[in-house]
């Protein structure tokens, strides 16, 4: 019997594999199904070490090292599954997910998420992007997973609230070199333009370099193995391709 994380990994590949999809469109029904399964995930399901979640008070670089820890669980041409662990009082700076879907499940503590939707018609005017600023959300480990799409809530800033926090991300397609499309999918950072007035929840975002106070160290994944199970599942999917 597959562990929950193995089922989620297999379903993520089934949902997002561009090899297995007859058309370029992602099935929102499958995304919702994946979101539902992901909503049950806890830190125990991935054997997240308690030491990574130790609360030493507000982050201090000299004592704590990196503000954020990154853990890669699985990656192929179409999907990245990873965990971010944020120490108390730190944030993932406002960033985008160009052309990507993203599912996020908090598995420890709670985070605030400030998300934005860029308005394509108002586009890039000298590096300024008109965007809708959505209401600030606080999401805890008890809440269901949440989702961003290529067109909605595609930018966000995520901060730990009242202590360390951890969340699992399923991203598709991955950042970096996209072998299938022959493009480089970069993560861009933004800030609200100084003096940008919120009018009908619209703000102006400006592109910035990655903030120097943000960086990640890495930790190893020690949960149920994923690659083998996902590969088996992929093989059975390919032989039953007409069913999907
Ligand atoms: Fe993100």
Image (cartoon, rainbow, N blue to C red):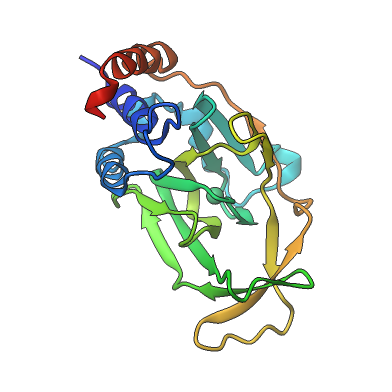
**Residue 198 visible, this orientation:** yes
Residue 116 at x, y percent in the picture = 53, 67
Q: Is residue 185 above or below residue 5?
A: below
Residue 25 at x, y percent in the picture = 40, 45
Q: Which residue is drawn at 22% across and 26% down?
A: 243
Q: Which residue is drawn at 61% across and 79% down?
A: 203
- Give the side of residue 130 with respect to residue 19, left or right: right
Q: Nearer the viewer, residue 56 or 83?
A: 83
Q: Quadrant of residue 168?
A: top left
Q: In this view, does 4 lie above or below 116?
A: above
Residue 153 at x, y percent in the picture = 47, 62
Name the quarter where the C terminus is drawn.
Answer: top left
Residue 184 at x, y percent in the picture = 69, 39
Q: Which of 194 and 47 is in front in this view?
A: 194
Q: Nearer the viewer, residue 180 or 46?
A: 180
Q: Which residue is drawn at 58% across and 85% down?
A: 198
Q: Which of 76 and 239 is in front in this view?
A: 239
**Residue 64 visible, this orientation:** no
Name the quarter where the N terminus is drawn.
Answer: top left
Q: In this view, does 222 lie above or below 100?
A: above
* Numbered marks: total: 0
Q: Quadrant of residue 239?
A: top left
């Amino acid at each position: 019997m597959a562990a929950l994380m193995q089922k989620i990994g297999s379903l993520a590949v089934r949902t997002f594999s561009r090899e297995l999809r007859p058309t370029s469109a992602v099935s929102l029904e499958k995304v919702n199904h994946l979101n539902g399964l992901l909503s049950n995930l806890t830190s125990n399901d991935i054997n997240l070490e308690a030491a990574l979640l130790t609360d030493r008070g507000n982050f201090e670089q000299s004592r704590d090292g990196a503000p954020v820890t990154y853990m890669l669980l699985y990656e192929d041409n179409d999907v990245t599954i990873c965990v971010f662990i944020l120490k108390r009082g730190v944030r993932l700076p406002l960033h985008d997910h160009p052309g990507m879907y993203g599912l996020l499940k908090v598995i420890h503590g709670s985070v605030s998420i400030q998300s934005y939707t860029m308005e394509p018609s108002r586009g890039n005017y000298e590096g300024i992007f008109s965007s809708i600023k959505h209401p600030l959300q606080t999401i805890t480990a008890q809440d269901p997973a949440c989702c961003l799409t290529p067109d909605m809530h595609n930018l966000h800033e995520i901060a730990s609230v009242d202590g360390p926090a951890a969340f699992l991300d399923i991203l598709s397609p991955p950042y970096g070199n996209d072998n299938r499309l022959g493009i480089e999918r970069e993560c861009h950072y933004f800030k609200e333009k100084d003096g940008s007035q919120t009018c009908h929840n619209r703000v102006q975002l400006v592109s910035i370099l990655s903030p120097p106070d943000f960086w990640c160290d890495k930790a190893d994944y020690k949960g149920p193995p994923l690659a083998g199970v996902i590969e088996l599942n992929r093989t059975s999917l390919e032989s039953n391709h007409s069913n999907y």
